[in-house]
Image: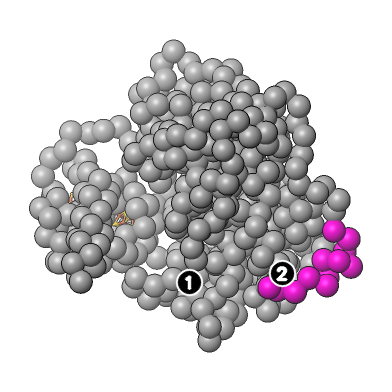
Amino acid sequence: MITFRGGIHPPEFKHLAENKAIEVMPPPRQVVIPCSQHIGAPAKPVVAVGDEVKVGTLLAEATGMISAPVHSSVAGKVKAIEPWPHPVLPTPVKSIIIEAAGKDELDCAIKPRSEAEIARLSAGKIREIVRDAGIVGLGGAAFPTSVKITPPRGVKIDTLIINGAECEPFLTADDRLMREKPEGIIQGAKILAKVLGLDTAYIAIEHNKPEAIKVMTEAAAKVWPQAEILTIKTKYPQGAEKQLISAILKRDVPRGGLPFMVGVVVQNTGTAYAACEAVTQRKPLYERVVTVTGPAINVPKNLLVRIGTLSTDVAEHCGGLKPNATKFISGGPMMGIAQSTLDVPVIKGTSGMLFLNDKKSLFKIAEEVNCLRCGKCVGVCPMGLVPCEIARMGEYEKLEQAERWGILDCIECGSCAFVCPSGRRLVQWIKYGKTLVFAERSRKKEKK
Ligand code: SF4
Ligand code: SF4
């Protein structure tokens, strides 16, 4: 079966939520919408405290080449614009706080575009719609989609891959979306392919999602028979885009490079669906599907949540936390980020919220001992790196050496730490090293 080199098979806990249909969470009383929810420059607020807004009102506009606007997810009044804790960034981020008025009035024109209108849209116009709707990669990376579907001049894209791997244990949001909205995803894939000048796409789904494979195959036959549904092996991190490209096309993205360099664009299934909604229904991205799961939440669910909803409200909607809850991770257990507060909002890149207790924690923090030189971490690294060495270089701040050994190519998948018998904090030291390398680069740039 199609797969990539390296990788691991962590225990799966998808059964907790995979059979829970997507439930719409009612809009909360207050939302906190960060101006930075994407890779690139933060958006700049265009509203002021006291302004009335509706669902879909533009709150902050994109600034610069790589950026994305943000929109209101509730109707109400802007209560404050101030720094607020963020689920991904280490320090509080400028956020627009809106008190909901109780009515769910929409600002966006709801009148859907007809098929004929959609067919007449040029590639440039679709890019503009996708950009104005604030769509970013919903798999977690949150790279602005309009930028991703605009390859550099002279670059020919020959393949579009829609990523339905969802390889993180516990997460089921993409699985549910594929099972419940297959036609919208296929339609979105067709729209994105049109922008790239392609007349087909691969839709890759791990073989642990048989129902999704079945309904997506049926939907493709109806909506866009040129789309090819590919069943790929269940292996972590199969959903990382470089691994997906390697598995499907046997092409290696060069070190430090991006998929367009090998003629490929990869988009998550949720992103394809959001693009479909933006183009066909003129809907900006103000809500997304989130898996709320783990042994320490009372009722695991897949929820359609308004962006800016606080995690504490989401947890409450899922019956609250069990008394033995010890850890809250935004995202999956492998690549998600442990949080110090439940006051962080759901953002565009929030694919899951995981509540763990000590018993079921995948990563029990074992006491760290010296490296045994067993080589297990090398065997599983999907990027072909030597994790034990680059982690050591990060720890001891040997930055030039770490760069030569490819520390910046680490995708932070955690596979190495997962198999390490010595409890080495490999990803922690690699992340530390990467931060120092980037800081050194900006210091040198400023000096010039
Ligand atoms: S070194 Fe990076 S890419 Fe390789 S296994 Fe470890 S976390 Fe993943
Ligand atoms: S898996 Fe752990 S103990 Fe083995 S070589 Fe890598 S860092 Fe060392």
Residue behind mark 2:
125
Tell me whether the residue at label 2 lies in contact with that at label 1, contact meaning CB atoms closer than 8 angstroms: no
Q: Which quadrant holds residue 379?
A: bottom left
Q: Where residue 383 appears, x then y in whole percent?
A: 34, 64
Give the quadrant of the N terminus: bottom right
Residue 400, labelled with which disc? none
Amino acid carrying mark 1 in the image: Pro
Q: Is residue 190 left or right of residue 45?
A: right
Q: Is residue 39 visible?
A: yes
Residue 74 seen = no
Please, is residue 260 above or below residue 360 in the view?
Answer: below
Q: Left of 139 or right of it: where is 431?
A: left
Local secondary structure at mark 1: helix
CA–CA distance between discs 2 and 1?
A: 24 Å
Q: Is residue 391 left or right of residue 66?
A: left
Q: Residue furthest bottom?
A: 154
Q: Nearer the viewer, mark 2 or mark 1?
A: 2
Near-viewer residue (345 or 316): 345
| Rendering coords of residue 372 (x, y %) | 13, 49
Image spot of residue 119 (x, y percent): 83, 70
Name the element at disc 2.
helix
Magenta residues?
113-125
Point out the image quarter for the C terminus.
Answer: bottom left
Decide which of 100, 85 is in the foreground and name it.
Answer: 100
Please say if 130 is above or below 339.
below
Q: Which residue is mark 1?
A: 259
